[in-house]
Image (cartoon, helix red, strand yellow):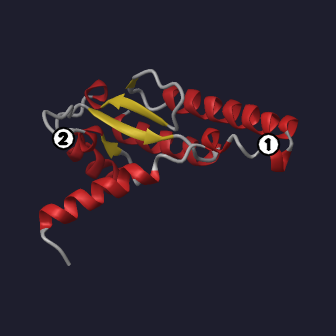
Amino acid sequence: MAAPALIQRVVKAHQFLIFTTPPNLQAPSPMAWGRARLLHHLHRHHAGQARSADRRAGGGGFAVAPCHGTYFVNVDIGSVGFQGDDADFCREIIEKAGVAAIPVSAFYASAPETSMARFCFAKPDDMLDEAIIRLKRRFG
C-alpha cells in the first residue's frame, strides 16, 4: 500500500533490476569452474544467443534495429503496417497472437519513442519459431 506515484517508481526500479544480471558479470567464477570450462560455457552461450537473435530478427517481417550484446531485439511496428503506438501493439499481439513484447516507451522518462517494440529472444528455438509463425499470421 502506497501512493500511486511511489508504486510506479518501485515498479520501474524492479523492471530495470531484474534485467541487469547478465552471465558475463559472473566472470569471477573461474575459480569454481576452472577458466577453460567457464570460457567454453560463455562462448557456447554467446553463440546460442546470437543464433536466436538472428532467428528472431529474420522472422515476422519487421524492420529490426541492430542488437549486439543483449537478449532483446527492437522492431519497428510500423514496418508491418501497425497504426497505433507501441503499448497498443503489445496489447494487440498478446490478445490476438499470444505473443508478448515490451513497449519501448516504458524505458523513457519523457518524450518516449512509441514506434518500437522489444522482443526477448532468450527462448528455445521452437518457442521463437512459434512466435514468428503467430506474428506472420497476424501481420502477414
**Relative to 83, is 135 on the left or the right?**
right
Q: Secondary structure at mark 2?
A: loop
Of residues 44 and 134, the one nearer the viewer is 44
Of residues 35 and 49, the one nearer the viewer is 35
Q: Tag 1: residue type?
A: Pro
Q: Quadrant of residue 22?
A: top right
Q: Quadrant of residue 74?
A: top left
Residue 133 in the image, given as x and y percentages of width and height: 49, 41
| Label 2 CA crowd tier, 10 Å (few <14, some 14–19, many 20+) | few
Q: Quadrant of the C terminus?
A: top left
Q: Tag 2: residue type?
A: Ala
**Relative to 52, is 11 on the left or the right?**
left
Nearer the observer: mark 2 or 1; the answer is: 1
State the CA–CA distance, disc 2 to disc 1: 39 Å
Q: Secondary structure at mark 1?
A: helix
Which mark sits nearer the N-terminus, 2 or 1? 1
Of residues 105 and 42, the one nearer the viewer is 42
Q: Residue at x 26, y 43 (%)?
A: 89
Q: Residue at x 71, y 43 (%)?
A: 28
Q: Which residue is mark 1?
A: 30
Q: Which residue is mark 2?
A: 109
**Relative to 63, is 7 on the left or the right?**
left
